[in-house]
Amino acid sequence: MWSEGHRAAIARIDQMLEQIGEAGTVDLAVLTVGERELRVWPGVTR
């Protein structure tokens, strides 16, 4: 189950990926939430 912080982080990653998608491509997007790191690789289904 996702915590509220994780849901907010996922929403921010989703927003980042939309902006990146408009601007071009990126190899890896990393967002740090507290001590946890969420990594999103291209091709990952949102």
Image: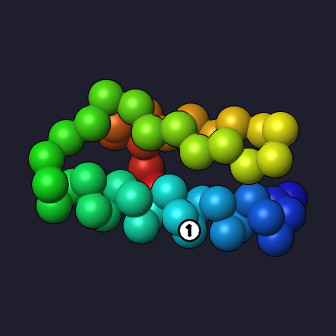
- From the top left corner, tell me how far across and down residue 10 is, in percent: 60, 60
Determine whether 46 is above or below 29 in the image.
below
- From the top left corner, tell me how far across and down residue 25 is, in percent: 19, 41
From the image, tell me which residue sits under label 1.
11
**Which residue is located at x 31 percent, y 29 percent?**
27
**Which residue is located at x 42 percent, y 67 percent?**
15
Left/right placement of residue 44 relative to residue 3 reads left
Total marks shown come to 1
Left/right placement of residue 17 relative to residue 24 reads right
* Image quadrant where one finds the N terminus: bottom right
Say which quarter of the image contains residue 18: bottom left
Secondary element at image label 1: helix
Q: State the residue in front, 2 or 16.
A: 16
**Which residue is located at x 67 percent, y 43 percent?**
32
Q: State the residue in front, 7 or 30.
A: 30
Q: Which amino acid does label 1 sit on?
A: Ala
**Which residue is located at x 50 percent, y 57 percent?**
13
- From the top left corner, tell me how far across and down residue 4 is, in percent: 82, 70
Determine whether 31 is above or below 41 in the image.
below
- From the top left corner, tell me how far across and down residue 29 is, in percent: 44, 39
Say which quarter of the image contains residue 2: bottom right
Question: What sort of colour scheme is used for the picture?
Answer: rainbow
Left/right placement of residue 10 relative to residue 22 reads right
> Callout 1 environment at 10 Å: few (<14), some (14 to 19), or many (20+)?
few
